[in-house]
Image (cartoon, grey):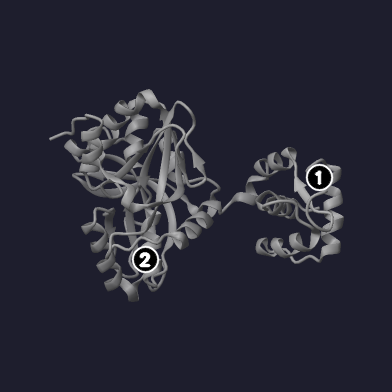
Amino acid sequence: MKQQLKVAMLRVLRDADGPIGSAQIAEDIQLYGFNLGPRSVRLHLKDLAGDGLVAASRRGRGGGRTITEKGVAEIGNALVQDRVGFASAKIDSLACGTTFDPASGAGDIVLNLSTAHASLIRPILRSMLPVFTTSFSMGKYACVFEPGTRVGNFAVPPGKVAIGTVCSVTVNGVLLSRGIPTVSKFGGILEIFDHKPLRFTDVIYYESTSLDPLTVFIKGGLTSLDNIWKTGRGRIGASFREIPTCMLPLVKETLNQLEAVGLGCVLTIGQPNRPVLGFPVSEGRTGLILAGGLNPLAAVERSGVAAGNSAMAELYDFAKLETYTELAERFDVKLPK
């Protein structure tokens, strides 16, 4: 059996509510690009069962199957080439789920999540909150989740806190809701000089990776937001988008509305069909550079405080976020003047 088909069948079984039969599996794997009949699926299920990846169940109809723990592990160990482009697909999926409307200020945004030991919350906020005073964050909002709190499918572990920051994929979703398709090209490290973008020093294209680029760069220590709010110099996470030039007036109007509600993150809007910071733009499109939503957490990483970052983690109600000044007051953290 081909590795891609094996992983697709295992994913269908993993995501099912209970035991399912070959007919349902045959239908569901079409979403992964496979067109097999129930009989062929049954033959492949025998192979998977022989490898200990699936098991028969007495529950359900028609000899349903369930995935085993070994099968779940097999998905995680899938060949990396099977996961290339995962970041790009996740961006598209979360953009479709974004319901935030800047005109009303209501709806779901895309949230990044970072976890750390609960005792470190104040040092974390002392490092990250100053970044919100600049134009190098995704807006002015964040949130803190206590141990045991559930955020979508994520549960904050005991003894830990989770810090949520707004992900720039929110912009994709808001534009999409207004009929504006956005192509996310790459994430990278953007050098800032005199408070302005100078050049990209490192980039990873979303279509060529199974990981979030900015998470990789932050963990690799490539950002430097130390006192960037004072000096106007440093290296930040940023992403490169393309939008249809014919919709540029509506794009600018939408971005201005996002800025007005505290979700501004635009660093550069290019000229139609012209390169932006040396990177070419497709015909009929205009380049757009956005500040990375994880930049406040990049400052935490630089400070030496241990935190685990997860980009594009969950959809979350915008109304439940707090401004960085509200968080500073709640946790008694002084902000730079």
Nearest to the observer: residue 231 or residue 249: 249
What quarter of the picture does the C terminus occupy?
top left
Image point 36% across, 63% down: which residue? Answer: 174
Q: Nearer the viewer, mark 2 or mark 1?
A: 1
| Image coords of residue 60 (percent x, y) | 78, 54
Residue 67: quarter of image: top right
Secondary structure at badge 1 equals: strand
User: Which residue is depicted at the point 83% across and 52% down?
Assistant: 45
Q: What residue does disc 2 label?
A: 175
Label at residue 164: none
Q: Percent x, y for residue 190? A: 33, 46
Q: Quadrant of residue 38?
A: bottom right
Q: Which residue is mark 1?
A: 55
Q: Amino acid at mark 2?
A: Leu
Q: Is residue 307 visible?
A: no
- When asked about the image quadrant of residue 74, the answer is top right
Left or right position of 12 against 128: right
On the picture, is 49 further left or further right than 184? right
Asked if residue 43 is positioned above or below residue 283 in the image, the reply reads above
Q: Is residue 75 above or below residue 224?
A: below
Residue 27 percent across, percent down from the top left = 72, 65
Q: Amino acid at mark 1?
A: Ala
Q: Is residue 11 left or right of residue 207?
A: right
Q: Looking at the image, tell me whether mark 2 or mark 1 is earlier in sequence order.
A: 1
Give the percent coordinates (x, y) of residue 279.
Answer: 38, 58
| Element class at badge 2 | helix
Q: Nearer the viewer, residue 258 or 213?
A: 258
Asked if the residue at tag 1 contacts the one at tag 2, i.e. Cβ–Cβ closer than 8 Å, the answer is no
Determine if residue 215 is in view: yes
Disc 2 and disc 1: Cα gap in Å? 44 Å
